[in-house]
């Protein structure tokens, strides 16, 4: 009798353990699915963001062109032209004065801000360099430098231009810094332009240490967003979506 009771209790315990394990797995899958949905939604928002309503902000708007290796500068220049066309005259356009010879080590395939400036000059787009003194650079330090300039100028809105494959991570980074340092600032995304064959071209990216076809770079960008979110360096996509929703409230 005792042996039978023990066997029955053991069977019940195993069943309960398996049931709890299945529930945990289902819950984990549901959380992962929700996280992936948030990521997908955020990527779509970043690539197709609402335009900046200058009637709302007046001239208290800054346009910022993100820094990139020479392979990707033309996309930023094209995005700058599109963004400027939608903004009133007199809006200041900024780019980072990131001199390659001052970086330790220098970034491969990066000719400095003058490469972008030459394209902007050809298009007749005025621009100004934002001083940058650190011996290293990444998207986070770039965003911190720009947000602090927005603070200095009492800007109400910031439009960020980046190549399409980098636009989601750039927007998430700028929103994260903004949430910490200047919560009242509204950040908008303006994805850069593309040309025929652009997505299939092999390029250098990310401080010159990543090389690949642009289409393949997208997965790496998403993985970085997940990793930096897990570390607490960036907002989660859901938190970023909530910020964008509040930005668009009237």
Image: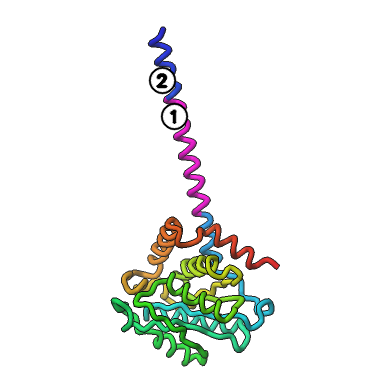
Position of residue 78 measured from the top left corner of the image (x, y, whole percent): 49, 82
Position of residue 11 measured from the top left corner of the image (x, y, whole percent): 42, 21
- At 47% from the left and 76% from the top, the residue drawn is 145
- At 40% from the left and 67% from the top, the residue drawn is 215
Depth check, front residue: 203 or 207: 207
Depth check, front residue: 20 or 99: 99
- The image shows residue 134, relative to residue 230, as above or below, that is below
The disc, 2 or 1, on the residue closer to the chain's N-terminal end is 2
Q: Which residue is mark 1?
A: 17
Q: How many numbered badges does the structure rendering display?
A: 2
Q: CA distance from mark 2 to mark 1?
A: 10 Å
Q: Quadrant of the N terminus?
A: top left
Depth check, front residue: 74 or 241: 241
* Image quadrant assignment for residue 138: bottom left
The reply to whether residue 108 is visible in this rendering is no
* Horizontal side of residue 134 vs 245, given as left or right: left
- At 66% from the left and 78% from the top, the residue drawn is 57
Position of residue 211 measured from the top left corner of the image (x, y, whole percent): 32, 70
- The image shows residue 179, relative to residue 81, as above or below, that is above
Badge 1 element: helix
Residue 10 — which label?
2
Q: Residue furthest left?
A: 105
Depth check, front residue: 101 or 112: 101
Residue 221 among those drawn in magenta: no
Does the magenta stretch mainly form a helix, a strand or a loop? Answer: helix
Q: Quadrant of the C terminus?
A: bottom right
Position of residue 235 measured from the top left corner of the image (x, y, whole percent): 50, 60
Residue 34 among those drawn in magenta: yes
- At 47% from the left and 73% from the top, the residue drawn is 144
Magenta highlight range: 14-36
């Amino acid at each position: 009798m005792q042996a039978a009771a023990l066997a029955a209790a053991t069977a019940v315990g195993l069943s309960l353990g398996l049931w709890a394990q299945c529930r945990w797995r289902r819950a984990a899958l549901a959380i992962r699915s929700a996280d992936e949905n948030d990521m997908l939604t955020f990527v779509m928002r970043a690539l197709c963001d609402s335009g900046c309503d200058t009637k709302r902000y007046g001239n208290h708007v800054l346009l910022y062109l993100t820094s990139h290796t020479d392979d990707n500068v033309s996309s930023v220049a094209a995005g700058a032209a599109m963004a400027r066309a939608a903004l009133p005259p007199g809006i200041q356009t900024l780019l980072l004065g990131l001199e390659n010879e001052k970086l330790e080590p220098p970034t491969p395939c990066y000719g400095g801000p003058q490469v972008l400036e030459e394209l902007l000059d050809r298009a007749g787009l005025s621009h100004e360099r934002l001083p940058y003194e650190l011996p290293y650079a990444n998207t986070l330090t770039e965003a911190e430098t720009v947000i602090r300039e927005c603070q200095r100028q009492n800007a109400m809105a910031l439009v960020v231009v980046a190549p399409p494959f980098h636009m989601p991570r750039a927007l998430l980074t700028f929103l994260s810094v903004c949430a910490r340092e200047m919560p009242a600032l509204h950040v908008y995304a303006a994805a850069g332009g593309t040309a025929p064959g652009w997505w299939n071209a092999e390029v250098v990216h990310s401080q010159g240490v990543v090389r690949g076809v642009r289409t393949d770079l997208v997965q790496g960008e998403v993985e970085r967003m997940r990793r930096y979110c897990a570390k607490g360096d960036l907002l989660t996509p859901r938190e970023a979506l909530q910020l964008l929703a509040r930005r668009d409230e009237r």
